[in-house]
Amino acid sequence: MTDTTNTYTLFAGPVLASMAAGASIADSARSHEISPRTVYRWLARGRRDPTSAYGPFADQVDRLRDLRRLPTAGHLMAEDEFRQCVWRAARAGSIPAMRLAWKILRADEEAAGAC
């Protein structure tokens, strides 16, 4: 078994779990101390040959991305749904989501203090 296959076997599941929690590919990879480039290679291999060991990984990533697409103008998120998405992404390690969560918390504190 090659190092690449071993890395895939060890980390594909955890990377997918991080992505399902809202993290980007790059954030998911870094949180498991592997290069994002490695994950993009797995994705390319899976798309190139869906019957390979990397095929199910690519399929799962594509499904997660489809779920995360922004809603159309006619289907905007409610405030609670938006907050849940932000918290989920922040907990998964997304730095931009952490920054946004912090801004939301600060705005909530300011609004509570103004009452």
Image: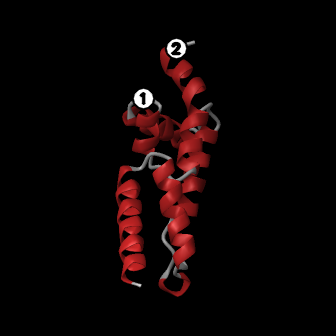
| Residue 96 to residue 19: above or below | below
Residue at 59% x, 40% y is 57
Residue 51 vs residue 102, the one in the foreground: 102
Is label 1 in a helix, a strand or a loop? loop
Among the 4 quarters of the image, the one containing residue 50: top right
Residue 2 horizontal side relative to residue 53, left or right: left
Q: Nearer the viewer, mark 1 or mark 2?
A: 1
Q: Quadrant of the C terminus?
A: bottom left
Q: Residues within 10 Å of mark 1 (few under 14, many from 20)?
A: some
Eyeballing the image, is 49 above or below 19? above
Are the residues at dot 1 and dot 2 in contact (C-beta closer than 8 Å)? no
Q: Which mark is residue 59?
A: none
Residue located farthest toward the top when viewing the structure as drawn: 1
The kind of residue on which mark 2 rests is: Thr
Residue 62 horizontal/vertical position (percent)? 55, 53
Horizontal relation, residue 23 to residue 111: left or right: right
The residue located at (41%, 43%) in the rendering is 27
Foreground pick, 13 / 110: 110
Q: Residue 10: where, in percent of width, then height?
A: 58, 24
Residue 19 at x, y = what percent?
53, 47
Secondary structure, mark 2, is: loop
Q: In this figure, which residue is indicated by the disc labeled 1?
A: 34
Q: Is residue 109 left or right of residue 9?
A: left
Q: Which one is earlier in the sequence, the residue at label 1 or at label 2?
A: 2
Residue 63 image position (x, y, % from top left): 60, 55
Q: Dot 2, crowdedness within 10 Å: few (<14), some or many (≥20)?
A: few
Seen at 52% across and 14% down, the residue is 2
Image position of 14 with respect to 19: above or below: above
- State the separation of the CA atoms marked 1 and 2: 16 Å
> What quarter of the picture does the N terminus occupy?
top right
Residue that mark 2 sits on: 2
Q: Quadrant of residue 39?
A: top left
